[in-house]
Image: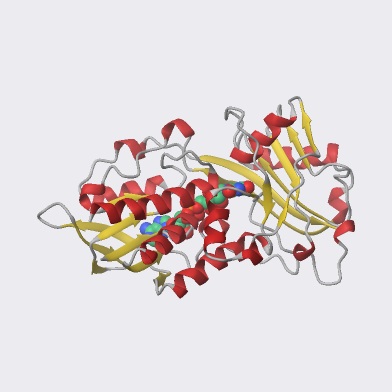
Amino acid sequence: MRSIVIGGGVAGLAAAVQLAADGSTVLLVESKDTLGGRVRMRDSGSWILDPGLHLMRRKGPLNQLLRKLRAPRVLGSRWNNREILAIDSDASQALTALATMSMDAEVIKIPEFVIPRGGWSSLVGRLIVSTNQMDVMLDVGSSAEALVLGPDGKLASVRISGNDIECDEVILAVPPSEASRLLESAGLDTSELRRCTEQRSAALDVALEGKPMRPYSGLFDANRGIIAIDVTAEDRIPEGGDSSACTILHAVSLTGDGPEALQDIKEFLDSRCSGWRNMAAARRSTTSIMLHPCSRAERVDGLAFLDHGIALAGCHIISEYHLSDAAVDTGRSAAKALKLNR
Ligand SMILES: Cc1cc2nc3c(=O)[nH]c(=O)nc-3n(C[C@H](O)[C@H](O)[C@H](O)COP(=O)(O)OP(=O)(O)OC[C@H]3O[C@@H](n4cnc5c(N)ncnc54)[C@H](O)[C@@H]3O)c2cc1C
């Protein structure tokens, strides 16, 4: 089987590994210059600052996949979820918001969280190593432009940077708008995907030479919709540094994006982490990053185009999981469904 995976984020990497494990010849196409998608590496000097608040669920599909791939070194340490300060809410609401990165999720059974060792980029790096070990071909820096169906309605090829590459099946591990554009290029109906509305957020990542959040490991303000956590770990600070005197702080607005939302995060930290601005050793912020590609109610069926040899993956696909766990779950499910459909 010749399979193509479009999109080199967590969902695409998980899908490619599964397809290769099931015996396919796999080509993974990523339009940016590096793999990883929304968790791709960004330089933050000698500190390890993830791009946005990123914790992994200890028993979630991503952690399970890493265990399967025998990657114990990236699994990291448990995050202390008992010391969260919930303002205008309670601890279970705060932890639900943290687990789902959403303000309106129903309270869920609270998971244990893990801080991946070496940050999310090392975790994604481990998935990339697995694709190499499984002989997945990588085409990084090339864009998938169109899907071409044969007269039987089955996928015949994918147009990648102007070339038609023949294949038998494809997984679209790209955001809904891009999946919709590609499916429309093959004349398929994408009305459900087009209904997806992105939820964007402002986020602030900062390395502090001090412990202004003490005694808490996390802060959640239900009225402002802001969550801030301390993910300090030995491997995230510069060599020779003392983790008991530093804070790796990530804060996200769960209610919106834009300069005002970022300002709101800073003012929240001013009120709860006094002096943090003067302690900043490394800092990165964004006024707008896509947090969820759609609302939970808008999630779509990833297997709706299976008869054409096409499956979808990502957090906009129906799954019992959230965030990167949903990406891994839907990536692997898409690969398994294509295998059964052959
Ligand atoms: C601020 C923030 C905090 C988060 N915190 C957490 C957390 O604590 N825990 C957690 O589990 N998750 C968290 N997440 C979510 C997690 O980062 C995402 O769920 C996950 O990275 C999504 O992966 P993906 O592969 O589905 O999508 P993406 O990462 O968006 O990957 C899609 C890829 O497709 C590529 N692409 C698009 N179009 C094309 C094309 N035509 N051809 C080729 N390639 C294409 C893109 O360049 C991109 O690399 C957070 C996200 C954000 C933004």
- Residue 164: quadrant of the picture: bottom left
Question: Is 259 displayed left or right of 243 in the figure?
Answer: left
Q: How is the image coloured?
A: secondary structure
- Residue 110: quadrant of the picture: top right
Question: 47 above or below 86?
Answer: below
* Residue 236: image location, x then y, percent: 75, 63
- Which residue is depicted at the point 24% across and 41% down? 189
* Residue 232: image location, x then y, percent: 78, 55
Q: How many marks?
A: 0
- Which residue is depicted at the point 85% across and 60% down? 243
- Residue 301: quadrant of the picture: top left
**Where, quadrant-wise, is the N terminus in this rendering?**
bottom left
The one nearer the camera, 99 or 147, is 99
- Which residue is depicted at the point 68% across and 29% down? 93
* Residue 12: image location, x then y, percent: 43, 58
* Residue 27: image location, x then y, percent: 35, 68
Question: Is 247 displayed left or right of 137 in the figure?
Answer: right
